[in-house]
Amino acid sequence: MGSKSGGGGNGMQTVTQKTELPGWVQDAGQRNLAKAYEVSANLLGPYEGPRYAGITQGAQGNIAALQNNVGSTNPAYALAQNTAANAANYEPGMVQPNFLTQTDLNPYMNPYTDSVVNYGLRALDTQRQQALNGIGDQAIRNRAFGGSRQGVMEGMTNAGAALNAGNLASQLMSQNFSQAQAGATGDINRAMAAQQANQAAGLQGAGLRVGAANQLGSLAGQGQEAFLSGSRAALAGQGMIQGDQQAQYDAARQAYMEAQQFPLQQLQIPLMALGQTPYGQTVTTTGPAQQQPSSSPLLQGLGAASSGIGLLGGIGSMAAAPGMSSMAGLMSLLPFSDETEKTDIKKVGKDQETGVTMYAYRYKGDPKTYPKVIGPMAQEIAEKYPDQVHDVGGKLAVNLGFPSMRKAFN
């Protein structure tokens, strides 16, 4: 690349400078540029495959079943609560004792007692009559009938008969009374036992109802827990299915990204090799002015890979960042002309076709032994040709397809 200025009465001198690079460097740069265009034309577009494995239909069904199951055990719990409350309010019947002194014994008296007593008394009277007849017969035989002796004996017989009759009647009545007492006492005892049995049965029934209420609540809880346990297991299984599907989606996307980055990685190898290969320059100058060695902006941009600033800036980070688009990755292959990436900057003139100011500079991080690069500043190109400059990761890069720029690289 050459530059020329004329002199006159003001003392200006004509300066001619020419920088020639080895042919193999120029050829390699052209091949790399052609490869970059090829990669740009054939680079895979944004990934359009599935990215998220949604909830499976089975999981949706399980969630719906869980929702429908809400409150399903409430009726059972309500019944258990009501049953327990009724049992808690249960009051056993009071046992009311009966007393013999307050009991009418007439129903317990033997209705045949009078007949038995009368029959016994008649028997005793018959015996008395027979005894009196015997006393009279004996008195006749002794020829003392009607005598005092006969009267005494008859009196004694009547008195004995009356005594026996009284004893028989009192004995039979006492037996009847005792039997009536025994019968009444038995009924009183049986009534007491029946009341106690009924009270115990009521308490036992209340206890059974409480136990049944507890069992009902427990069974409802066990059923609910069994349902939830099954639902959790089913959801876990569906989650495994969803996770496996997500893993397949991720693997497919990763494979796509690898295929997308592979051409860029292939291009990186010759770029890095060319950038790290030392080569000399032939500089021819005319005139006393201080010369500024220059090199092709294309080749210097390609050679900046060694410092991570030039053409290769961002390739490695692009491959590691799945969120960066393919176009952004390709733009990292364009030479960075951002002013913030340059140092030792000195203005050398203007490009006559584009009117862009040209500078001599080095990229930050390059050794001072590196020759300076002749090229524009991306910020100035952006002012005149904004469509030819791209923001890549916060740094400006110039589009190599810009016609005037392409001339400078030849």
Image: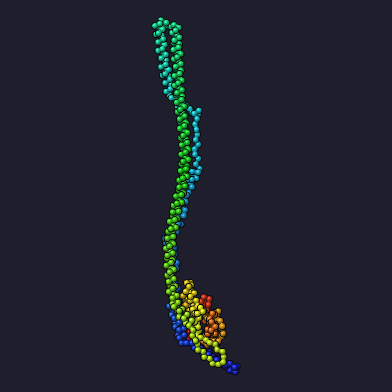
> Quick one: which residue is furthest to the right in this view?
10
Q: Nearer the viewer, residue 309 or 174?
A: 309
> Quick one: which residue is furthest to the top in this view?
143
256 is higher (above) or lower (below) than 399: above
Q: Nearer the viewer, residue 65 or 155?
A: 155
- The x and y percentages for residue 165 are 44, 17
The residue lying at 46 percent from left, 83 percent from top is 29
Q: Nearer the viewer, residue 53 or 248?
A: 248
Q: Nearer the viewer, residue 334 or 276?
A: 276
- The x and y percentages for residue 259 are 43, 74
> Quick one: which residue is furthest to the bottom in this view?
9
The residue lying at 43 percent from left, 66 percent from top is 247
Could you say which quadrant of the image residue 182 lies in?
top left
The residue lying at 45 percent from left, 14 percent from top is 160
182 is higher (above) or lower (below) than 327: above
- The x and y percentages for residue 22 are 47, 87
- The x and y percentages for residue 114 are 43, 21
- Which color scheme does this rendered protein use? rainbow
- Residue 65 visible in image: no
